[in-house]
Image: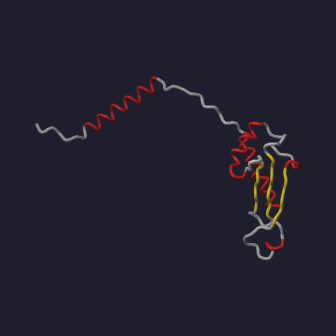
Amino acid sequence: MTIPEDELEFRFFRAGGPGGQNVNKTSTAVQLRFDARNSPSLADPVKERLLKLAGARATQAGEILITAVRFRTQERNRADALERLNALVEKASIAPVKRVATRPTLASKRRRLEAKGRRSTVKSLRGRPDAD
């Protein structure tokens, strides 16, 4: 599942950290903004799961903000932000499997009770021997 480029908004700014003089004069950090709540390319259940998965990266307005500052170039940070957004969308697009309630089989109940009986016998034999 891919998101069209026109739904994404990029903002570039100067990143902190190592990089020497390069970090002071180039805007290599990237902030990706995606309006998930109003996106026409996602189904409603996917939008809900995506906003829940985004956690603190989601705003109250339903936008997802991803900041990428890992690399020293703008292109690599932009690609990193897109990869992270795509990973989130892929994870949100998988619907959770409903659990089907089942009952234990008769044989498993019997095995459990036999194991409890064996354990009870082992523990009762640990006591002091009779003083006959």
Identity of the residue drawn at 79% across and 43% down: 37
The number of numbered discs placed on residues in the rendered structure image is 0
Q: How is the image coloured?
A: secondary structure
103 vs 16, left or right, is left
Give whichever of 120, 93 is nearer the camera.
93
Position of 100 relative to 91 (above/below): above
Q: Position of residue 126 (x, y in %)?
A: 25, 41
**In this view of the protein, which residue sits in the foreground, 22 or 44?**
44
Location of residue 23 with respect to 29 vertically, above or below:
below
> Residue placed at 37% from the left, 32% from the top?
115
Residue depicted at x 36% and y 32%: 116
Placement of the N terminus among the 4 image quadrants = top right
Residue 108 drawn above or below residue 6: above
Most distant residue in the bottom direction: 21
Query: Residue 88: where, in percent of width, then height?
Result: 73, 47
Residue 70 lies, in percent from the top left, at 74, 63
- Quadrant holding the C terminus: top left
Corner quadrant of residue 47: top right
For this orientation, the residue located farthest to the right is 6
Q: Nearer the viewer, residue 115 or 54?
A: 54
Q: Which residue sits furthest front?
A: 60
Q: Is residue 88 above or below residue 43?
A: below
Q: Position of residue 48 (x, y in %)?
A: 73, 40
Judged from this view, the residue extending furthest toward the top is 106
